[in-house]
């Protein structure tokens, strides 16, 4: 069935089809619509779920942890300051190996107070042990809602999943979306079964303390679970393609990178405009390409190195800054290239902060400046000079 949906509404449809059992909700702009739609689905009985309206974002994730700890499929959503308020709970969820799914509507963080979209909220929390994916459009948002449970609940992964949607640009923009049938969704996503739960028939200790002797072992297993997600993501996408006919490409999407001399790396909804720019420049004979990072954790080290292996130069375009240094995505990309022994010049362009528009002319300028083969970090759209 085809529907005209916003990104928030598309994600809510995916959560309905995933037959989530517990939804812990606290509204925050621009996430509010997703939990509003889910509350309506619970009310009209199109979704059989417990909808719990909690008093804060901290409580929302705490509630989801409790639900997951008794073996229920749990969901919550947040944004910006709400995600930061949850930070304490993020590591409880990942350390406890609870496969909660959370939608984060990417939004600028204070101060100054701002409700518009950039990606500083989620990228500041990369080390919390959550899988992090970034949708480009409403269709991918719905599909991620389904695949996220398949991935996070896999016995080799058992890791919470944060699906990120750019605030307003994606959460509130309407598109035509293919909504699967319940039968198709059930074929992809089995009923949630786990041994990692409170069970009176098989008692075990959860969320306990561990001193120096054992703590590192638990953290190492947590790390292995994240790494195992790489293969499970591929497995989920192959099964998804077989059932739904739509194809995804793992941790990254390569667009005209095979023969590209200059490649722009980005994530989220801005990739659509970059793709259009690549097509425009290709018509002029420029060998340019796009590398879209679909996942930031686990990080696509090998995929980045492979895509950039024959390039003359590359650049990162991100809606994030690690103050006093550079963009967080840029740091990770350079690490991937260093480990692969690649030495091509890579620049960092920071834009879209606080929802500021990124124009096609700026993307064209980035590709043009790559040809000079310099390396810099630059704020775009602010008048700031490269550093």
Image (cartoon, helix red, strand yellow):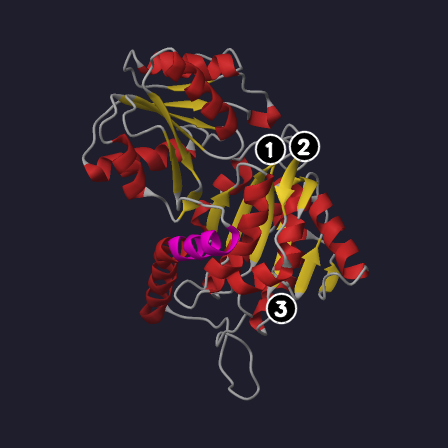
Q: Residue at x 58, y 53 (%)?
A: 102
Contact? badges 3 and 2 (CB < 8 Å): no
Point out the stretch of residues depicted in magenta: 234-244
**Relative horizontal placement of residue 276, taking residue 301 as reference (left or right):** right
Q: Is residue 293 visible?
A: yes
The residue drawn where x is 56% and y is 26% is 353
Q: Where is mark 1, residue-wise? A: 108
Q: Quadrant of the C terminus?
A: top left
Disc number for residue 2: none
User: Which residue occupies the foreground of this view, 175 or 332?
Assistant: 175
Task: Please give the residue where the numbered disc 2 appears in the rendered image.
Answer: 115
Q: Which residue is mark 3?
A: 67
Q: In front: 151, or 62?
A: 151
- Residue 346 visible? The answer is no
Q: Residue at x 45, y 71 (%)?
A: 209
Q: Residue furthest right?
A: 44
Q: Residues within 10 Å of mark 1 (few under 14, many from 20)?
A: many
State which tag comes first along the sequence, 3 or 1: 3
Q: What crowding class fits label 3: few (fewer than 14 Cα within 10 Å), some (14-19), or many (20 or more)?
A: many
Sequence-first disc among 1 and 2 = 1
Instruction: Identify the secondary structure beneath mark 3.
Output: helix
Kindly indicate the quadrant of the structure image that contains residue 126.
Answer: top left
Magenta stretch holds residue 42 = no
| Distance CA(mark 3)–CA(mark 2) | 30 Å
> Which is in the foreground here, disc 3 or disc 1?
3
- Residue for point 35% across, 21% down: 288
Report x, y in % for residue 380: 49, 17
Give x and y (percent) for residue 281: 40, 15
- Residue 316 in picture, x, y percent from top left: 39, 27
Circles 1 and 2 in contact, beta carbons < 8 Å: yes
């Amino acid at each position: 069935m085809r529907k005209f949906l916003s990104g928030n509404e598309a994600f809510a449809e995916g959560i309905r089809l995933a037959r989530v059992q517990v939804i812990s909700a606290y509204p925050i702009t621009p996430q509010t619509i997703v939990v509003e739609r889910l509350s309506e689905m619970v009310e009209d009985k199109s979704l059989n779920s417990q909808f719990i309206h909690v008093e804060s974002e901290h409580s929302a994730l705490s509630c989801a942890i409790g639900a997951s700890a008794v073996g229920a499929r749990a969901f919550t959503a947040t944004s910006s300051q709400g995600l930061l308020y949850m930070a304490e709970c993020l590591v409880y969820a990942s350390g406890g190996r609870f496969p909660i799914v959370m939608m984060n509507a990417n939004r600028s963080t204070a101060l100054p107070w701002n409700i518009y979209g950039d990606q500083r909220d989620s990228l500041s929390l990369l080390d919390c042990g959550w899988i992090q994916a970034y949708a480009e459009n409403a269709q991918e948002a719905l599909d991620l809602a389904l695949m996220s449970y398949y991935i996070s609940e896999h016995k080799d992964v058992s890791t919470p999943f944060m699906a990120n949607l750019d605030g307003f640009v994606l959460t509130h923009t309407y598109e035509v979306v293919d909504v699967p049938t319940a039968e198709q969704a059930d074929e992809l996503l089995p009923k949630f079964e786990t041994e990692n739960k409170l069970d009176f028939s098989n008692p075990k200790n959860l969320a306990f303390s561990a001193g120096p002797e054992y703590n590192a072992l638990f953290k190492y297993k947590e790390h292995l679970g994240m790494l195992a997600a790489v293969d499970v993501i591929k497995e989920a996408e192959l099964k998804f393609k077989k059932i739904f006919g739509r194809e995804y490409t793992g941790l990254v999407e390569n667009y005209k990178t095979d023969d590209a001399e200059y490649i722009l790396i980005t994530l989220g909804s801005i990739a659509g405009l970059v793709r259009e720019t690549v097509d425009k420049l290709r018509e002029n004979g420029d060998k340019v390409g796009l590398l879209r990072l679909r996942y930031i954790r686990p990080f696509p080290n090998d995929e980045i190195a492979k895509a950039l292996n024959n390039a003359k130069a590359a650049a990162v375009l991100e809606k994030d800054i690690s103050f006093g240094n550079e963009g967080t995505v840029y740091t990770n990309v350079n690490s991937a290239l260093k480990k692969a022994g690649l030495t091509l010049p890579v620049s960092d362009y920071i834009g879209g902060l606080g929802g500021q528009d990124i124009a096609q002319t700026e993307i064209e300028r980035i590709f043009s400046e790559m040809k000079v083969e310099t390396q810099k970090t630059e704020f775009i759209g602010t008048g700031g000079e490269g550093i």
